[in-house]
Image (cartoon, rainbow, N blue to C red):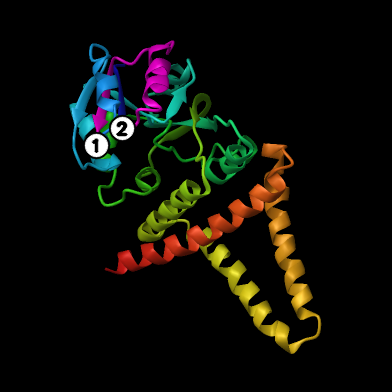
Amino acid sequence: MKISLVVTVLNEEKTIEPFLNSVEKQTLKPDEVIIVDGGSVDWTLEILAERKEKIRVLIMKGANRSLGRNRGVEEATGDIIAFTDAGCVLDKNWLLELTKPFSDEKVEVVAGYYNAITKSAFEKCVAPYALVMPDRVNPKNFLPASRSMAIRKETFNKAGGFPLNYSDNEDYVFANQLKKMGTKMIFTKDAIVSWMPRTTLRSFWKMIYRFARGDAKAGLRTLKVLSVFARYGLLLLLLFLSKYFNNFLLYFSSIFFLYLLWSVVKNYKYVKDLRAFYILPLLQLTSDFAVISGTIVGLLSREI
């Protein structure tokens, strides 16, 4: 099998070198590496130019990730297309493990796994909100994400490529399209990339907001989003009723406190840092309101 690695970049000067180094250290080297730049204005292109003998760089100013990846696949000569993101560092056996299942001719897509490179308590707390943690993985329904996946080029073209009108969650929409097509997908936990979590509350909010906006526009994760709206609808109802019943405000406060405590209980095992007792509730509230606002904007854009 000939393997092409396709990656999109945009202003990745801080992360591109560790990524390229991890590509060079692969035990199974890709036959070609195609990097599509969406119009970087930092030093990304200069760094890439230093390694031009090992990679092909395509420049598409203003292109979103879908357009960039689709163009990369068009230019690729491999039978198997591997995808990852420039903000990741690849395990040395990533490509080897990711492409092993294709020895079975029936396998069309392989979903790899990912973990987080964390340097602070905040980043450790972000990880369970952004990734599927190991104990929550269900291999039977684990959908491929663009940070760690491979697909036969024929299957990619049959699916129509990444959807151009979704720039927030294009890989999730694409994965669901593959699922609807009945594509034979395999999950391999040993094809691992390490991802760098958001480092500020603002960037975390923006990430969750964009995911929610894209999901609402595509009509995905409906039940999960409804549960968030239901939580706050119930809290508002309790708050309204509190003025009619003695001590009801106390009950409301207790329920709200228990909700925040739940955010710690469900995720503390991934952090194991006392600072998580105030960071996790903050992230829970931030995530909830990002989901609510992103969903509303996504639904409105869908109607238009």
Q: Quadrant of residue 5?
A: top left
Q: What type is the residue that disc 2 sits on?
A: Val
The reply to whether residue 28 is in sight is: no
Q: Which residue is mark 2?
A: 9
Q: Nearer the viewer, residue 11 or 8?
A: 11
Given residues 38 and 222, the one toward you in this image is: 38
**Callout 2 touching callout 1 (CB < 8 Å):** yes
In percent of width and height, residue 169 lies at 38, 48
Q: Label 2: few (<14), some or many (≥20) within 10 Å?
A: many
Of 157 and 235, the residue lying toward us: 235
Task: Name the residue that disc number 1 marks.
Answer: 38
**Residue 121: quadrant of the picture:** top right
Q: Which residues are magenta?
A: 11-38
Q: Residues within 10 Å of mark 1 (few under 14, many from 20)?
A: many
Residue found at the very far front of the displayed protein: 42
**Residue under the image location 20 percent in, 34 percent down:** 71
201 shown above or below 289: above
The residue positioned 40% from the left and 60% from the top of the image is 216
Q: Percent from the top left, x then y, of residue 109?
A: 39, 32
**SS at badge 1:** loop
Residue lying furthest bottom: 244
> Which of the marked residues, 2 or 1, is nearer the chain's N terminus?
2
Amino acid type, label 1: Gly
Give the quarter of the figure containing the N terminus: top left
